[in-house]
Amino acid sequence: MRRLSRILLATAFAALLVYACDFLLLRFKIATNRHAFDTVTIQPLYAVPQKDGKTEFLTGDPQDQACANSLFPQAGDPPCWYLRRKKEKPINM
């Protein structure tokens, strides 16, 4: 039991350390006017339920969304690597 608690504590500390380094790296990029933020064009998909129980997907106009060049979400923006992989944004109606 003691070993398990130490492993969990070490894992939590390592995750906190990685997040703190990511935060500090983004702040360094902002301070030195480097490429800290970017925009990614996403395609919204509207999920419209039909009377027969099926769902119809309608595409909307492409939208630009701001993102942070970091590993985790920072400054209220999602990470760019995630938005580049998930370019379609489903919206339930």
Image: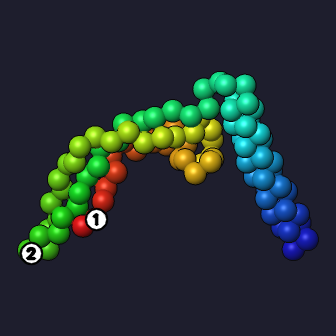
Q: Is residue 62 left or right of residue 56?
A: right
Tally the numbered discs: 2
Q: Secondary structure at mark 1?
A: strand
Element at badge 2? loop
Q: Is residue 85 at all visible to an observer of this figure?
A: no
Q: Of residues 41 and 9, which is closer to you in this image?
A: 41
Please state if 43 lies on the left or on the right of 77 as rendered. left
Whether residue 91 can be seen here = yes
The percent coordinates of residue 16 (x first, y second) are 78, 53
Query: Does residue 57 appear left or right of residue 34 in this picture?
Result: left
Looking at the image, is 66 positioned above or below residue 16? above
Crowdedness near tag 1: few (<14), some (14–19) or many (≥20) residues, C-alpha within 10 Å: few
Question: Going by the image, does 16 lie left or right of 77?
Answer: right
Give the residue at x 9% y 75%: 51
Disc nearer the start of the sequence (2/1) = 2
Q: Which residue is mark 1?
A: 92
- Give the number of the disc on residue 78: none
> In the image as oriented, which residue stretches furthest toward the left?
52
Q: Work out which quarter of the rendered image holds the C terminus and state it.
A: bottom left
Q: Nearer the viewer, residue 58 or 64?
A: 64
Residue under the point 38% across and 39% down: 64
Other residues around mark 2 within 10 Å, as few (<14) / some (14–19) / many (≥20)? few
Q: Position of residue 82 (x, y in %)?
A: 49, 43
Q: Given contact means CB atoms under 8 Å apart, are the residues at marks 2 and 1 in contact?
A: no
Locate residue 13, reporting x and y percent.
83, 55
Give the label on residue 51, or none.
2
What residue appears at the point 55 percent right and 47 percent down from the top-left corner? 77
Image quadrant where one finds the N terminus:
bottom right
> Amino acid under label 2?
Lys
State the CA–CA distance, disc 2 to disc 1: 15 Å
Figure colour scheme: rainbow
Q: Position of residue 70 (x, y in %)?
A: 62, 38
